Amino acid sequence: MTTAITMRKSEVGELRPSQVLHTFGIGSIVDLPNLSVLVMSMEDWPIAHSNEVGEERLLASVQDILGPQVTRLLTAPRAEETIGALTNWFDDFHTIGVPVAPFPRWMVCTACRLLAPLSSGLFEPKTVPYRPDKASYVHSICPKSKRPAPVVPARFLVACEKSHLDDFPWLEFVHGDKQGCPGPLRLYEVGPSGEAADVQVACDVCGSRRRMAEAFGRENQTKMPPCRGRRPHLRDFDPGGCEEEHVTPILQGASNSWFPVMVSVLSVPQATDKLSQLVDDNWAILEKATSKDIITAFRQIGQLKEFSKYSDSEVWEAVERKRQGTGESDVAPSDLKTPEWRVFSNPEAAQESRDFRLRIVEPPDDYTQFFEKIVLAEKLREVRALIGFTRLSSARDFDTPFELPEEQRAPLSRQQPTWVPSSETRGEGIFFQFAEPVLKEWTDRTRTFADEFVAAHRRWRESRGLDPAGGFPGMRYILLHSFAHAVIRQLAVECGYNTASIAERIYSRSPLEDEPMAGVLIYTSAPDSEGTLGGLCALGHPARLGRHLDQALENMRLCASDPLCAEHQASQDAKLHGAACHACAFLPETSCERGNKYLDRAVLVGTVERSELAFFE
């Protein structure tokens, strides 16, 4: 299933619904074959073609961050599936999707190298019916081409830490002190490498020329103008302005141009009986019911097929009980993991549902002292909501989205949002619950090592203007996080899913803070209605899992970058990891919840540098 991206009432491409949150969300740039476009704000989305996603815990967390006016979680708008031969290109079918606008606005003619903004009127849009991949802009009066010459986006942009984005200041940059010359400008490739040093911008009128390399690097930062506070996805400028003295130049496809700020929860059962659980699962529909007659109407139109064993009166009574009990949870909306931990650590009491099923298995023979229990999550449902985005700095630098400073999180709409983009995926996983006594003994004997990480953590937060005293996740988190990375890298070899498709969820809390937590969930999910195929759960049986744990830990003993990797300490730099690198412990961005920070394979097993920290002796 895909959702269209539309511009000027024309479809210009397709994205998967999950991509609209993770990769190409609001404010991000989508590279198409002949142009690049920016995903616009929520005000422009045709939400009449969106579906509501039901997940109370997630909605409560989003309301805690964005405000109580948020009442719905909606998927990306998507037209109904139709047969191509019956679809008229000029019908509204091809205007349903996520709205986009061309960005950057400065374009370059591929023939004469003219560099000009779209507002100059020199470039014209061109769309081809039935071929959205052919959408482009052309230079119709190009002096060096007999036919309209295609134009491409200028691949340089500027951004700032407050998530503002703007076109590169071409006129100011090339003219320097000689301001006032209107151009025209031309962008030349003067070398074969394509690097900034081989790209030159020149003015036809005054003859000014500058290499793009002069805009990059710390020593050249002062050559850039101050930030204008532009928010192109909202079509405005930040009313509060921007305090950044100089903007930071970036390339169009730079990985740091857009980072999503998302809230994610697993749909774990909270009810104590089957009917109440069914009401929870279908609450997005049932919360609209104000009388038993509406329940009857829902049943008549086929909305309550799962309630066939129950009468309308029983369903209505269950809805009333839930409505009266809403808000009585002892867990704060910002605490996303405690309800999940309580279910995974006590699977016998968990209610099964169409999206949730657990099964306990014995730990492998060699690991019974380390794990309290291992639980196979044969069915899981994960719901995510996009609440904003950042540029230049990733939100994964923080433990939760609640810790991200509000000024760094760019808004998704001009007004206070009443809904947020969401997606749901279904899958499977393996949950490891660590033995608390063994873990406590390990943390007690690694206090000296913890001081090294704490010192590095304080320096890292100070360099970003944050309170150095807060945010340290603790040594147990470093152990659980390192273990999760080791297991994911090993399971990906055999489970049938690549590393980027497997994610971690760390449950870590010290007994000194509150109810202790020490667990790791390794899971994978897919947007298909049936979820995944069971390849990950199949590796959780004791015989197979023991072999994979042995190999995962053995892989952590030596690294291809040793001894440099093993000698690295968190206190050496601001990277917040010890003996860990891309060759041994790092994972793709989609897999790690902390951006490959707070890792050290020496806490798992002995390395060539140190062995006194090993948990699995």
Image: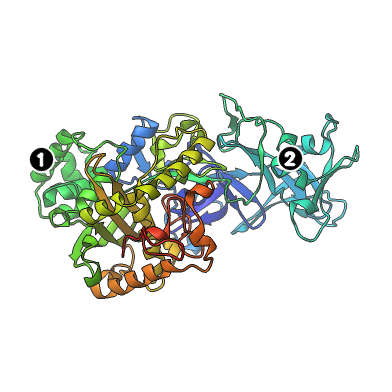
Residue type, mark 2 in image: Asn
- 255 above or below 497? above
Task: Please provide percent x and percent y for residue 515.
Answer: 21, 43
Q: Residues within 10 Å of mark 1 (few under 14, many from 20)?
A: few
**Circle 2: element type:** helix
Task: Please provide percent x and percent y for residue 527.
Answer: 38, 58
Residue 305: which disc? Answer: none
**Res 297 seen here:** yes
**Res 95 seen here:** no
Colour convention of the picture: rainbow
Confirm or deny contact between disc 1 and disc 2 (CB under 8 A): no
Task: Please provide percent x and percent y for residue 423.
Answer: 38, 50
Q: Mark 1 sits on what residue? A: 317
Please tell me which residue is depicted at 78% across the width and 55% down the height of the picture.
Answer: 110
Please tell me which residue is depicted at 85% across the width and 57% down the height of the picture.
Answer: 146
Please tell me which residue is depicted at 46% across the width and 48% down the height of the picture.
Answer: 21
- Give the spatial CA distance, label 1 vs label 2: 68 Å
Residue type, mark 1 in image: Glu
Q: Mark 2 sits on what residue? A: 220
Q: Residue 129: name its quadrant.
A: bottom right
Task: Please provide percent x and percent y for residue 135.
Answer: 65, 54
